Amino acid sequence: MAPMYEIFELKNKLKVLHIPQKSASATAMILTKTGSRNEMGENNGVSHFLEHLLFKGSKKYKGPKKLNEAFEILGAQHNAYTSKEHTAFYAKSSPKHINEVVEILTDMFVNPTIPPAELEKERGVVIEEINMYEDMPMHTIDEIFEETFFGKHSPLGRTILGTKENIQNIPRKEILRYKNENYDASRTILVLSGDLPKTIIKKASELAKLEIIERKTQKQNLNPSTKVFIKTKKTDQTHFYLGVPTFAYNNEKEHVLVVLSAILGAGMSSRLFMEIREKRSLAYYISSVTETFQDCGYFAVRAGVSNEKLNEAISATVQLLENFKKPTNSELKKAKEQIISSLLFSLDSSDGLASFYGKQLLLKGKIKTPTQIINKIRSVTADEVKNLAKELFLQPKTLAVIGPHKNKQELETIIS
């Protein structure tokens, strides 16, 4: 029987994670433990900007056209993303082309040229990306919430996109310094998933050139207290995030939290959807969110509501959370099946497999197989869910709002 995953080490101790799986596609993904929490106020946004700039050419592929063509001539789909705690670069292709894909991806990661002219052009592109999201409150309310919850000038409170001023002015030498200090062997892994040739590991030789630069991650301090922030904006619908602190990765209650969140806000028969939308007609969309980081986390409810019914919607949400009733057997079974199905569906493709295994190894330092996670989910009891709800929802709450509102004091009273 083939192993579920294998871990190799290059000469510089950089880990290569291989997930052997017969599939129509294969994926190569480079993950680096570098995101906006590694930044300071003056260079906030550099991680995401750097993600863009790596597509502008490398040692072997001069300029953005040649680099992108190198992927696309193989029929490969390639992309990247930046989060608070990591950045990912990945490409998916047919298994017969994965050797070439790994060579392109590793050259792009280790040997980017970041041509000055391309850098200057990309400043405008990223600023337009910031503008685009500022025009989409549904997609920025989470960042407003995290600024409020963690503190605007704290590691996890800084936005991923950064400020327009920073993007406009950050010098090329500062971007290169940041790249060299953070894209190192100790913070990077290569993930390979699919039905791959045995020679594939050798194609990662460029990554063996990375140095080991041990750096401590900035600690995130939490100050649990009632906090409200309103971004006053003329909108046809008000968007809000209401949340409480939870815990970090690898907490023994993380599977209970996932089940609790599913009962409250996953699907059209969840408690929040039925109470706030179906029964009271207060919202168009409403769901729950959980986020965990290496030293903290949060649970939140996100919703889009009528401008006139904001106070009523928040009040009803607070009551539902604080008076959480023990889940029925039916609710518990439904939540577990939703979670398990969602997990299994996400593993249907080589890129889903790469992300599932790779992020665990990078961020948590260990891997739980799908079977281990499913067994944990199935073992969660109704009493565990009820007890966790009681522990979490009586804490001080944080509320972020985008819409035509100004009365902060009124909202503080509701969530207190």
Image (cartoon, grey):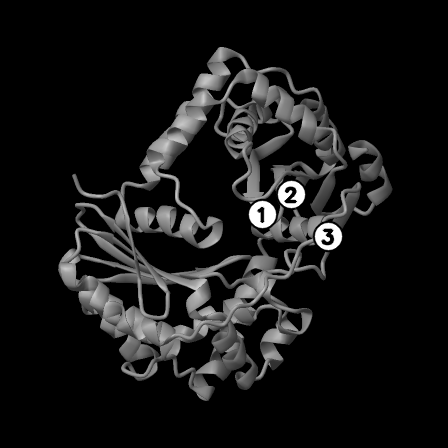
Left or right, 31 with reference to 223: left
Looking at the rendered structure, the secondary structure element under dot 2 is strand
Please tell me which of labels 3 and 2 falls first in the chain.
3
Looking at the rendered structure, the secondary structure element under dot 3 is strand
Residue type for callout 3: Lys
Quarter of the image where the N terminus is located: top left
> Cα distance, mark 2 to mark 1?
6 Å
- Residue 72 makes an appearance in the image: no
Specify few, some or many for label 2: CA neighbours under 10 Å numbering under 14, 14-19, or 20 or more: many
* Image spot of residue 299 (x, y percent): 61, 37
> Cα distance, mark 3 to mark 2?
10 Å
Quarter of the image where the C terminus is located: top right
Q: Nearer the viewer, residue 301 or 349?
A: 349
Query: What residue is pinned by disc 2?
Result: 239
Please tell me which of labels 1 and 3 falls first in the chain.
1
Query: What residue is pinned by disc 1?
Result: 138
Quadrant housing residue 243: top right
Looking at the rendered structure, the secondary structure element under dot 1 is helix
Residue type for callout 2: His
Q: Which residue is drawn at 23% across and 63% down?
A: 201
- Residue 231's disc number: 3
* Image spot of residue 52 (x, y percent): 44, 71
Residue type for callout 1: Met
Q: Are marks 2 and 1 in contact (CB under 8 Å)?
A: yes
Q: Which residue is drawn at 44% across and 54% down?
A: 362
